[in-house]
Amino acid sequence: MLSKFPAKTSNIRACPKYSAIPCHKQKLYFKIVSCEKNASSNSPNSSSSSSSPADNKFGFKLVGQTLGDKNWKFNDIDAHAMQESVNQWLSKTQSFFNEVTSPIVKSVHDRRSRSNLQNDNGDMEDILITEQTIDSRTPGGDLSEAAIVSIEQFSRMNGLTGQKMQKIFKALIPESVYNDPRNLVEYCCFRFLSRNNAEVHPSLKEPAFQRLIFITMLAWENPYRKRNDNQAKLLERNTFQGKLVGEEAFVRIAPAVSGVADCPTAHNLFRALAGDDKGISFSIWSTYINELLKVHEGRKSYQSQEFPQVSKEKVLCLGSSRKQPVIKWEKNMAWPGKLTLTDRALYFEAVGLVGEKDTVRLDLTRNDSRVEKTKVGPLGSNLFDSAIAVSSGPESESLVLEFVDLGGEMRRDVWYAFINEVISLYKFIREYGPKDGDQSVFDIYGAQRGKNRAVTHAVNAIARLQALQFMKRTLEEPTKLVQFSYLQNAPYGDVVLQTLAVNFWGGPIIKKLTDSDDETDSDVRSTGEIPESSNHVFDIDGSVYLRKWMRSPSWGSNASLAFWRNTSVRQGVVLSKNLVVADMTLVEKAAMTCRDKYKVAEKTQATIDAAMIEGIPSNIDLFKELVLPLTLTARNFERLRRWDDPLVTASFLALVYTLIFRNLLSYTFPVTLMILSAGMLVLKGLKEQGRLGRFFGKVTIYDQPPSNTIQKILALKEAMREVEKYLQNVNVVLLKIRSILLAGHPQVTTEIALVLLLGSTILLLVPFKYILAFVIFDLFTRELEFRRQMVIAFMSFLKEQWEAVPAAPVVVLPFEDKESATEQKTQVEKVKPERTQSRS
């Protein structure tokens, strides 16, 4: 039943599971919802957070109530609203009886459409219409409906009104920060989220909280109301259907909710969820959260009694199914079995035809653990590209597992990301965490739980990837969605790992520091920067990460030193080390730089991949197009040398000889570089002005004409023949040079040595400028009439002498198998001592 009663109020405190919607007329409406939606459909534990069974005995729930004026006046009741609510109640009652009397057997399509409609109606029924207490007028414009909803509802979830939260926030920060409504949205949201430190925020089980987070992301992205949106109504049925959350808002808000996203990989998670769209819709958002909760609930139901050794470990994934089997390849034999991944090891139990098979355990916490993608197939053939090879060290044998996926091609890559994340996790702990048994962890509050925090992050990352796998929305490289694997190879990833280590193991100091440490601590807290003499690293909330834990060489890199010199929060409000209003945490700062550098690297790699053209003829055409400027320069120089334009050639020679005899050669190279740089800057300016066109700088080639398979084979054979001939000529030249240098022909070696000795004498006695002038004179007079016959005779003499030089001999030995040769040697060595013993 729906009934509305306008009334005056002062303060309201609502249950966190309901959303707040503003009303333009400063009134409070109470909404009584009939046929309460069963919130436990998504989670069995959600019923525990709801009201008592006595309150919901008749299927009604009171969503709001007044705490102020309790004396209602009969004249204040809106008759039109009352009539509309009663009509809607009667309509729902009639629909309920029609559904009961309808046939029980229905098609699957009808059931799905009806469930979707019920979900849409449920989304609207859980909305609480409350009073707008904040001033929506700001210097930048009026607040949007989503911003008012987020601020008001989170304020009441914090035990205050929106107006009081607004006043508190105004007193905390400067006016410039206060004028940005995004900061107020962050403050109200982050203040509520900072009250819970669970691995996965418990309020995510409530559909209303999921919608409130979505509204908060919309509010952060569009905090101001549009000019043509004065009469926007958030209660319409298409409230969430046409709105999309952008990447910037998702990266800012989603990681603040425990278990939803990690800062280093939030942008990749957004790309996976958005797909080809420009943003994330509410249906995708709610589906992702529900799938994520199902993964966490499913882990609780995993039966670990089958493996007694798994009792102290947390089971993350199971890989055993009829449609998606896991096959172990060993000595060209395939054995299906059950695969279990925990937070410390990988277990495989083969399914045996007779008796039980032993369980294979690979420890993933060891330093030498690794996982690689590989190919498998019968009889040693690499036919199936759907396997991985896992090993826990050089001494252990590799476990080759094939992941058969009848519904897609990403299963192997996803499991590779799962296993690689666990391996990368313990590599991170060894490199950035304290050593095992280090007693200094008890000097820092909470440092002994740092390893558990790191494991929790990896476990949640794997759960998110599982949820995306169920949604079929993974990226081409699933390792980009799990942070430890992603940061191992990402640019600036070492600095992000350092900030994560400070976040995990940093905390307040319990043990009293020495005088020098106290001075360092006071300097850091007063200036906000780490002095060069500091021994420790400090987080934004004052948490300390000890110097003795910095065993990784990355702490001494230039990027790390530059980052840790400026880690203070200038204007924001620090709620915790993970939540900062109007500013960013250390992890967010490092992750943003890492994301920008990775995008630049991706763009560079994309240009390289685009230049990798297939086909020998196409690559030859591309090479010709790239060396075209050099070809044109060579052609013009050849024209100068042949005196095609005597005036230009004479002018060029006059310039060259002026540079030579005026001793200006030392300035030639610097001036050339200056002209080149000036030309590059001019082109840059013209391109920024758009005066060179969009296609300037692009290399254009024509595709090869279509041909059949036989023509391609013949063309390839001809190309290979040309390459073979070219290699033969190059080898002959190298063999002749080798023969000359190694005195393969003594007479030719003597002549070449005398020529080199004469040349070195000339270079020592004659100044270089005269030698250069003579070389240029010889070069530009070869084609003239008075020297042409002399040059032809001299070149013929050199050709005859070169052809007379013999090549160094080449010996081709027969093929020998190295393995068989080593076996023969070992057998001979074994036989020799036996003969000596028999003789003795």
Image (tube, helix red, strand yellow):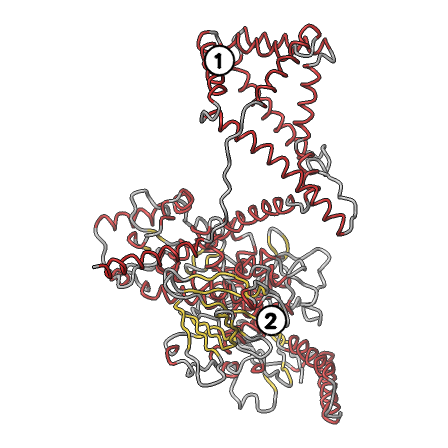
What residue appears at the point 66 percent right and 36 percent down from the top-left corner? 623
Dot 1 crowding, Cα within 10 Å, few <14, some 14–19, many 20+: few
Q: Where's residue 216, x and y in %?
A: 58, 63
- Vertical arrangement, residue 157 with respect to residue 62, above or below: above
Query: Disc 2, disc 1: CB below 8 Å?
Result: no
Q: What residue is pinned by disc 2? A: 405
Pointer 2 local density, CA inside 10 Å: few below 14, some 14–19, many at least 20: some
Circle number at residue 376: none
Question: In the figure, is residue 430 to the left or right of 727?
Answer: left
For badge 2, the amino acid type reads Asp
Q: Nearer the viewer, residue 230 or 255?
A: 255
| Disc 1 residue type (three-letter) | Gly
Residue depth check, mark 2 versus mark 1: number of the one nearer the observer: 1
| Nearer to me, 720 or 243 | 720
The furthest residue to the front: 839
Q: Is residue 508 above or below residue 283?
A: above
Percent coordinates x, y for residue 671 in the rendering: 56, 18
Looking at the image, is 766 positioned above or below residue 257?
above
Q: Residue at x 60, y 19 (%)?
A: 800
Report the residue marked by disc 1: 759
Q: Name the residue at the bottom extreme.
A: 101
